[in-house]
């Protein structure tokens, strides 16, 4: 089972970002895939294959803020306190500390990160996100 804040042993390569968008229900939807490498012939380069089995949808039902950063260096990321490898949960971060929660709202904000090949997606939310593999979904057309 894939979870934030844990080592993701199912990921053999760094994930790639396929989609990020806000749904009509005001959810944040992130789709990532872990490409499988297929070796080429003698004169061919290896190719990356994306299938339903290695594609995952992450839904944030109640997010307060998100940001996507294209990065070439992990330096800023490595300065933060977090658990996990590609699906991280931050304990303390500048981004989390920069946002004041709404007045009268008692739930603590949580800071999650999704590390992909060229992007860091960070989400501040009040609930744990829902992660579903595409091969576990019965009807992809039901997604907004």
Image: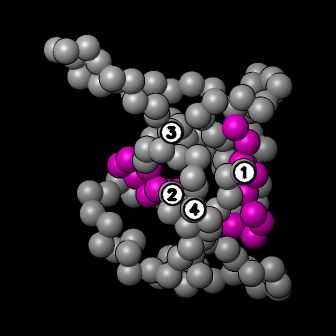
Between the residue at mark 4 and the residue at mark 1, the CA separation in whole angstroms equals 11 Å
Q: In front of the other: label 2 or label 4?
A: 4
Say what secondary structure mark 1 lies in. Answer: loop
Q: Name the residue under label 1.
A: 1
Q: Provide the secondary structure element on which disc 3 rests.
A: loop
- Viewer-proximal residue, 21 or 7? 7
Question: Quick one: label 2 or label 3, which is nearer the N terminus?
Answer: 3
Mark 3 or mark 1, which is nearer to you?
1
Residue lying at the far front in this picture: please name it.
42
In the rendering, which numbered label is found on residue 34? 3
Q: Give the mark nearer the N terminus: 2 vs 4.
A: 4
Q: Where is residue 55 in the image (x, y as percent from the top left)?
A: 60, 34
Which range is magenta? 113-133
Q: Can residue 12 be seen in this view?
A: yes
Residue found 75% across the figure and 25% down from its top:
140
Mark 3 / mark 4, whichever is N-terminal? 4
Residue 27 horizontal/vertical position (percent)? 72, 49
Measure how far apart labels 3 and 4 are at the Cα level.
14 Å
Q: Where is residue 132 in the image (x, y as percent from the top left)?
A: 73, 42
- 62 vs 12, left or right, is right
Decide which of tag 3 and tag 1 comes sooner along the chain.
1
Element type at marker 2?
loop
């Amino acid at each position: 089972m894939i979870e934030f804040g844990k080592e993701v042993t199912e990921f053999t390569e760094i994930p790639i970002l396929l989609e990020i968008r806000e749904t009509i229900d005001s959810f944040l939807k992130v789709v990532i895939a872990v490409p499988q490498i297929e070796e080429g012939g003698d004169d061919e380069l290896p190719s990356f294959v994306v299938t339903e089995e290695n594609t995952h949808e992450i839904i944030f039902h109640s997010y307060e803020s998100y940001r996507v950063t294209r990065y070439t260096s992990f330096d800023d990321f490595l300065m933060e306190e977090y658990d996990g490898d590609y699906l991280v949960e931050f304990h303390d971060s500048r981004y989390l500390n920069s946002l004041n929660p709404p007045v009268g709202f008692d739930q603590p904000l949580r800071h999650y990160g999704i590390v992909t090949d060229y992007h860091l997606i960070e989400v501040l939310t009040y609930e744990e996100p829902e992660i579903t593999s595409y091969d576990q979904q019965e009807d992809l057309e039901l997604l907004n």
